[in-house]
Image: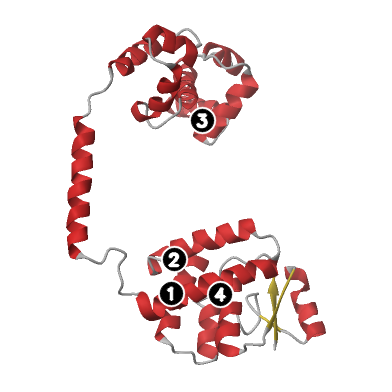
Amino acid sequence: MRWITRERPKIDRLACPWLIKRFIDPEAEIFYVPLRDVIRRAEELNATPFDIPDVEFTHYQDKCTFDCFLEKYKLDDPALLTMALIVRGADTDAHHLASQASGLWAISAGLAFNYKDDKELLEQAEVIYDALYSWARHLQDIKHTQNPTDHILLEVYNKYLRHKKSEKKTPEWVNEFKELIQDQIDLNLSLSLKEISGELKVHPAYLSREFSRHFDDLSFGDYIRKLRIEKALKLMEETDYSLSEIAYLTGFSDQSHFTRIFRKQLGQSPSMHKRTLKGKKNTKG
């Protein structure tokens, strides 16, 4: 038999061909074409369309096409029923249906990103679904860590690590660094890692490597940009400076640079944020 569906598959359009070839028709041919061509090409190829609207094999109610195939062909293998929940959860973003659903989505999205040829993508996905079926049929009750003693040892070890981490004192250079930043916060934040390492008498390579551990898991550059944006937000709220003036006062090279970093950190442009602030002030007034 021939089966046809729309191109660039992710979940259902990979899971269903695997199901067809493993449990319905081992000689099946699968075709992927643009959505607009599915029905026309189905007639030309004498192929059965699936996972598109208004055909027999498609989504219905809260089920996906994989479920439809199971019901149509009366496939009641418990392993396939387990897989159906995972596939449905991944395909419909209902990850609460099965703990494995988010993992299947992540792997499928990664495969689709890596393989641009749909047939090659299906070949790779078949390996994944073979493995998922083996797990569902034989390994569901098997844990990665088998020995109960291992669980106890891991728990003790993790508690030890947390304890040791809490015992570590903050290096003196961190406090000095924070003071330097505070001193510069009103002077355009024109700090460089090389200059600071000289003042702190700390090697710049060490400073760069250790910085994120003590400053919100951010690199030096990201942390400085974060402070600049925080200062910009304060200026926007408390003053009537233009955006170009705020960009200058917060140490950005120009308004365009300021806008780009602002949007990256806050998800909106500074002009939009400023209009929002203005609207709130007018409402209060």
Q: Position of residue 45 (x, y in %)?
A: 79, 84
Q: Which residue is mark 4?
A: 15
Label 4 residue SS: helix
**Mark 2 or 4, nearer chain start:** 4
Distance in Å between CA atoms under marks 4 and 1 = 12 Å
Q: Which mark is residue 154?
A: none
> Residue at 32% across / 18% down in the picture?
174
> Residue at 44% across / 23% down in the picture?
208
Report if residue 185 is visible in the image: no
Distance in Å between CA atoms under marks 3 and 4 = 46 Å
Q: Is residue 17 above or below residue 104?
A: below
Q: Which residue is mark 2?
A: 101
Distance in Å between CA atoms under marks 2 and 3 = 39 Å
Q: Position of residue 257 (x, y in %)?
A: 62, 23
Badge 3 density bin: few <14, some 14–19, many ≥20, Cα 10 Å = few
- The amino acid type found where label 1 is placed reads Leu
Q: Which residue is mark 3?
A: 276
Distance in Å between CA atoms under marks 2 and 4 = 13 Å
Distance in Å between CA atoms under marks 3 and 1 = 44 Å
For the residues labelled 1 and 2, say whether their Cβ atoms are less than 8 Å apart: yes
**Mark 3 or 4, nearer chain start:** 4
Badge 4 density bin: few <14, some 14–19, many ≥20, Cα 10 Å = many
Q: Which residue is mark 1?
A: 85
For the residues labelled 4 and 1, say whether their Cβ atoms are less than 8 Å apart: no
Please identify, in this view, whether the residue under mark 4 or under mark 1 is nearer the observer: 4
